[in-house]
Amino acid sequence: KFSKLEREEPDAIVQIMNKYSEDTDDRKVDVTIGVYKSESGESYLFPSVAKAKEILRANDPGHSYTVMSGIPEFIEGARRVVFGNDIPQEGKLASLQTISGTGALHMAFVFLKEAGYTNYYLGIPSWSNYIGMIEHIGGTVTTYNHYDETTRAVDFDSVTENLESAPSNSVFLFQACCHNPTGADFTKDQWIKIAEIVKTRGLFILFDNAYQGFSSGNTEDDAWAIRYFYRQHLEFIVCESFAKNLGLYGERVGALHVVVQDKDYVDNAQSTLTALFRHECSFAPAFGARLGSIIFQSPELWKVWENDVAEITERLHHTRKQIYDRLVQLNTPGKWDHVIHQNGLFWFSGLTPAQNERLITKHHVYSTNIGRVNVAGINKSNVDYFCQAIDEVVRN
Ligand code: LMR
C-alpha cells in the first residue's frame, strides 16, 4: 500500500541538531537550531513568562476548547505587538491564533491559495523549511539572491530586479527583521523602496515575523516596516511567532494577521481563515497563548517583557562583540566585522561547507552546514574554544 513513498531526509537544521544530541564529547558546542540560551548555556525562562505562569496557576481556566479563531485576549495582544495600539482599532485586520510561526506560515499559504495566490518569490539563502512548505500546498517558488557574500549584507539590486520583473500578484516572502539565516536585514530606506515597487507593480508581501525585538532590543522599532506598509495602504499578511520573543518554543504560540484595507472584505477574510483553520487544526494550543494573554493584558507585565527582550538583545550584541574581539586577537585570516553588523540570533559566518564539516568532526562545534551560527549558543565558558575552532578550520 505504501510502495510509492520514498525515504525522506530530515530538514538540514534538524539533522545537525540530532547529530549534536548524539555527540558525547564534553567540549561540544550547540550553535544549531534557533533557540535562545542564557549565559549559563541553558534554555531561558523569561521573568515575564515566569510571573504569567504563577498567575495562570492561581486562576486555572481548565482544559476545555477555546475559540476557533483564537483566544480573544491573546489575539488582541498579538495585534498590538505587531501593529501598535492604534492600527488594530481601525478594523482592517483579520487574525488567527496559530501553531507558532510555522503554523502561521502554513495557514498563510493555504489562505493565499484560496484567494488565488500561489506564485512565490523567495530571497536565498533562507529558512530551510519555506520551499518545502510552499510546494506542499501546491505553490511554486522562484528564488533570487537575498545576500551578497562580498558585502555580507543584503543584495538589494537582486531584490529590486526581482520585484520589478515578477508577474503581478506574485507573493514575496520577506522576514520583518533578524533575517534567518543571514542576519542581513533591509534598511528603512530599502523598505520604503520595496513598498513603492510593491504598490506600483501589484505584488503581495508576506512578512515572516519570528524575531521581533531581537534586532533593536525594542519590539516597536522592529515592527517599523510592517507599520510602514500598513500606512502605505498596502494589503499584506504577517506571520507572528512567539517562540523566540517569549521563549515559548514548545508551546507553539503564534498568530497570523491579514491586512484588508477595504473594510468590506474583512469579514470574508476572517471567516475564511477560521473555516480553513477548522479544516486544518480546529483549535490552537491554549497554554502558551494564555501566558501571552496575561502578559499582553497587564501593562506592568508588558514592561517586564520589554525588559526581557532588551536584555536578551543586549547579550546577543555583547556575545557578537566577544566573538569578533577573539577572532581579531587570534589574527584569524579573513574579515570578521560581519559578526557585529548582522542582526538577531544568527551570524552567517561565510565558512565553506568543508570548514563547517570540520568544525563538527574535529571540534564538536555544530553550526548549520551553510555556516549559520546561533550566537546565543556562545557564552563566557565556550567563546575561546569556539573561536579557536574557527581559527583552526580557517587555517586548514
Ligand atoms: C531555526 O531556523 O533554527 C528555527 O526557526 C527553528 C526551526 O524550526 O527551524
Image (spheres, helix red, strand yellow):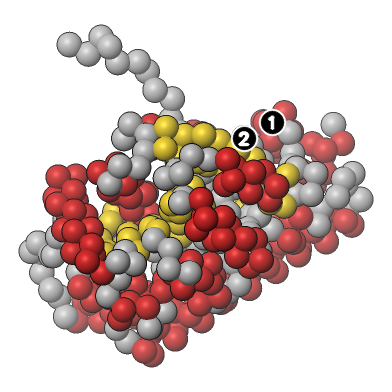
x and y percent of residue 385 in the render? 74, 50
Q: Quadrant of the N terminus?
A: top left
Q: Quadrant of residue 396?
A: top right
Circles 1 and 2 in contact, beta carbons < 8 Å: yes
In the rendered image, which residue does mark 2 sit on? Answer: 369
Per the image, the residue denoted by label 1 is 353
Q: Does the image show residue 309?
A: no
The answer to whether mark 2 is within 8 Å of ligand 1 is no
Q: Is residue 99 above or below residue 118?
A: below
Mark 1 residue crowding within 10 angstroms, few (<14) / some (14–19) / many (20+): few
In the rendered structure, which disc, 1 or 2, sits on the residue that comes first in sequence?
1
Q: Is residue 304 left or right of residue 51?
A: right
x and y percentages locating residue 81 in the rendered image: 40, 74
**What's the distance in space between the residues labelled 1 and 2, CA to CA?**
6 Å
Neighbour class for label 2 at 10 Å: few (<14), some, many (≥20)? many
Kindly identify the amino acid type of the residue bearing the numbered disc 2: Asn
Q: Position of residue 201 (x, y in %)?
A: 51, 50
Looking at the rendered structure, the secondary structure element under dot 1 is helix
Residue 15 vs residue 153, the one in the foreground: 153
Pinpoint residue 253: horizontal percent, then vertical percent: 32, 61
Report the front residue among 2 and 48: 2
**Is residue 337 toward the left or the right of residue 207 in the image?**
right
Q: Judge left or right: residue 251 versus residue 372.
A: left
Of 173 and 203, the residue lying toward us: 203
Seen at 70% across and 69% down, the residue is 318
Helix, strand, or loop for circle 2? loop
Q: Is any part of residue 360 visible from this angle?
A: yes
